[in-house]
Structures are given as C-alpha cells and as structure tokens.
Image: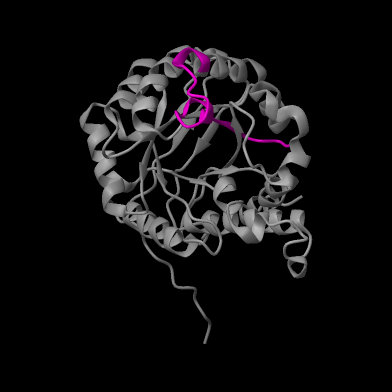
Amino acid sequence: MAFEIPVEKWTAAVSALTIGAAEADGGTRTSTVTVGGETTLPFLGFEGDTPNRPAIAMEVLDVPPPNYPEPLSAAFGDAVNDPAVWAKRCVEEFGADMVCLRLAGAHPDQENKSAEDCAQAVKSVLGAVGVPLIIWGCGQPDKDNEIMPRCSEVAAGENCLLGTATEDNYKTITAACMADGHKLITEAPIDINIQKQANILVSEMGLDLSRIVMFQATGGLGYGMEYAYSIMERTRLAALGGDRMLAMPMLSVVGPEAWKAKEARSPEEAAPEWGAAEERGVSWETTTATCFLNGGTDILVMWHPRAVALLRKTIDSLMGEEA
C-alpha cells in the first residue's frame, strides 16, 4: 500500500512585514527585508509556503562591549570602538541582512549617554550602511523612554524596527513608532499570554498589527533554550490556528545569549577538555540559532561572523536554495 504523508490543514498565516525604506519609499536604504508570510510550520513545504527567508541581523553596540569573549574580539578587532565601522564590516564583509544597533552606552550603569548621543550613533550607522536597521534601547525602562523618541525621530522615514515595547513600558516607544513610520518589537519574558497582552496594548494605541515583530526573551543552548523553543512553537501554532494577536513574525536574540554560556566563553586553559574556545563558541551560537530557526524565528540577531556564515548555509538548505 502506498504511503501518503499526512498533511495538516491550517486556517491562517503569519503576517508579512517589510523593514527598511528605499529611496522610492522616502528612505535611503539600498535594500529592504521582508519576513513572515508563512502558511505552515517552519519549512514544511509539503503543507504550505515559506515565502520569505529568515533574516540574519548582526548586533553592533554604541560602546565597546565589556568582557567581550576573545574569539569575538579577534573577529572584529578595533571596529568595536566605532559603531559605524563595526556595522560596515558586518554588512560588507560578513553579509548581514540587517544591523541591530543596541544602545548599551545609555544605560545608567554604563556611560549613561544622552538621547542626543544615542541619536548621533543611529545617524552614523544609517550613514555607514544601506541595510535596514534595528534600533534597540539599553533595557532600562526610564532611560529608554528618554532616548528612544529622539532616536526614532532622526531615523524617520527609514522604516526601522524599534525595540522593545513591554507590557509595563510600551506607550512612549509605540507613540514614537507611529509618529516616525517605524515597525515595533514587542517583548515578553517567555510567556505567551504576556506576549499577547503586549500586542493588544500597542494595538489599542493605534499601531497596526502588521507593524509588530514579537520577541520572546531568548535562552541559549543548555540555558533555557528548550523552554524558549516551546513558547515559539506554541506561538506559531496559535498564529496558524487563526489567533491574530499572535500572528506576527518572531525575533530571537541569539548571540548575546549563546555567548553567556560558560561552555561558549571559557578560555581553553580553564577547560582544555572542551576543545578550542573559538570552535566552541561558534558552535554554541550556531546550534542555538538553528533550533530557534526551526521553532519559527524570522529574524535572528547574531554575533560571530562564522556563526552567521554557518546559519546562512542552514537557511539556504532549508529554503532549497543551496548552490
């Protein structure tokens, strides 16, 4: 008897979303990125479509990163002293689809940079590269409310992706997105109900659901990845089942989480039995990213260039685009 692959019939789709504005759209980007639009679970081509490739963003900080693991310091060298130079290398040498500029220097526990300082960093990166930009705050709610409106303003018309809006701190950044024509990242602490509530709150302010990307706080391999994956999977199932409040593309912050693991960042002399530090770290980041890719992530924020290259090959294979 012939075997027939069982096919799931879904009633809905993930919404598609474009980041970046070319000259014809009032911006200066030389490329744009469209994600989402899936009508099936990840890469199950016999059940539905995955019309847009997952996008790879590389993270750039506005200040030199403290305690950067040696393999990453070696990969970027002095570029980490200037976010524009760093971003340019990510795009021109390592092929990033997007740049994620994290305004870490604004945090009160770091350099407590002003809104104008942060805006200048945004302008410098926009001037250095033509890819779409993710502008990410420092993670301190009051400070983000201070800096993000100005950063949004200087990037007006570029259709950036701003982050993040949480259930308890969403009004200022949502208003900035609406005023300046950007997309918005809503964040939840690995909780599908809080994620849904954040989406509802920003939509009630008037932001269209088609302008939202979801971020469930990410865990690295061996440090919460399994739980994060399960939440992503449940979110995708809800979207395909018709829940409009969970039908947005998803983003994962892979690099910082993967390199937090002691297995990724410990020097070789501390654990010689674990092998070469650079190989460990790259493998840890690539494996974490691949898992989230199969959980339904549409945008992956990466750190190491070699992990980016390996992830790109994986995406090529899953999309049927291998050379």
- Residue 222 painted magenta: no
Is 313 placed left or right of 2 in the picture? right
Residue 241 coordinates in the image, percent (x, y): 30, 56
Residue 19 coordinates in the image, percent (x, y): 49, 29
Residue at 32 percent across and 54 percent down: it is: 191
- Residue 100 painted magenta: yes
Q: Is residue 113 visible?
A: yes
Q: How is the image coloured?
A: one colour
Which range of residues does the magenta coloring cover?
Answer: 94-117
Residue at 48 percent across and 25 percent down: it is: 106
User: Residue 201, located in which quarter of the rendered image?
Assistant: top left
User: Residue 115, located in which quarter of the rendered image?
Assistant: top left
Q: Is residue 156 visible?
A: no
Q: Nearer the viewer, residue 231 or 4?
A: 231
Q: Residue furthest bottom?
A: 1
244 relative to 95, above or below = below
Q: Nearer the viewer, residue 267 or 225?
A: 267
305 relative to 11, above or below = above
Residue at 77 percent across and 50 percent down: it is: 323
Residue 306 coordinates in the image, percent (x, y): 74, 47
Q: Nearer the viewer, residue 273 or 33?
A: 273
Residue at 73 percent across and 67 percent down: it is: 274
Q: Nearer the viewer, residue 47 or 297?
A: 297
Is 288 placed left or right of 213 in the picture? right
